[in-house]
Amino acid sequence: MIHSDVTIRYSAATNEVDVSGSAVALEGLGNALLQDDTEVATSQGSDPSPYSAYLSGVRLRLLQDGMVLVAVDEGQGVLTFTGSEESMTVLADNIRDLGREGDAGDHLHIEHHEDHFYLAESPISLVVSRDDG
């Protein structure tokens, strides 16, 4: 199990997920995305507003083929990423680049759209934010 200072907030009503962390935490999360069958324990604050809850971690699984499927396992309270190493590398690079090149407060939206080249269709709306606070 990997421990991370990333926080993950979730709203079941809207299927929105916010992942936020410092440059170092985002780098670590990006690196973890390339490790098969890995779990990442994340930090939790006292108030997830405007979301309804904190998720306790991330579960990662690499497959031989396939685009990245982003999902929430509500029973376990974790965000899951499943996909090929090639597709996960694109996602990992995007998250690490936000940490390396972004400024505090910058964010990126990671959502499937028609003809997306590395994300599978999913109801989850994911925002990754750089928070150096």
Image (spheres, rainbow, N blue to C red):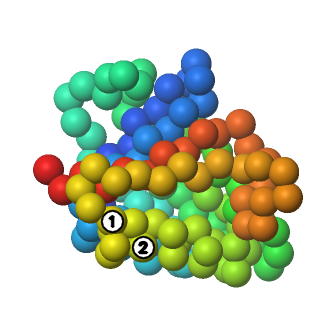
Nearer to us in this view, 41 or 131: 131
- State whether residue 5 is above or below residue 16: below
Residue at the location (39% across, 66% down)? 98
At x 33%, y 65%, the residue is: 102
Q: Are marks 2 and 1 in contact (CB under 8 Å)?
A: yes
Residue position marked by numbered label 2 in the rendering: 97
Residue 8 location, quadrant: top left
Q: Residue type at mark 2?
A: Asp
What is the secondary structure assignment of the residue under circle 1? loop
Instruction: Give the Cα distance between marks 2 and 1.
Output: 7 Å
Q: Residue at x 43, y 41 (%)?
A: 18
Say which amino acid is labelled 1: Gly
Rendering coords of residue 19 (x, y %): 41, 48
Q: Say if 42 sits above or below 35 in the image.
A: above
Please tell me which residue is depicted at 60% across the width and 78% down the height of the picture: 89
Which residue lies under the disc numbered 1?
A: 102
Is 6 drawn above or below residue 35 in the view shown?
above
- In percent of width and height, residue 30 lies at 45, 71
Question: Residue 83 is drawn in which quadrant?
Answer: bottom right
Q: Is residue 13 left or right of residue 112?
A: left
Specify the quadrant that holds the N terminus.
Answer: bottom left
Query: Along the line of sight, which residue is nearer the eye, 81 or 91?
Result: 91
Q: Could one spot residue 99 in this view of the protein?
A: yes
Residue 67 tag number: none
Circle 2 sits in a helix, a strand or a loop, which is it? helix
Q: Is residue 88 left or right of residue 118?
A: left
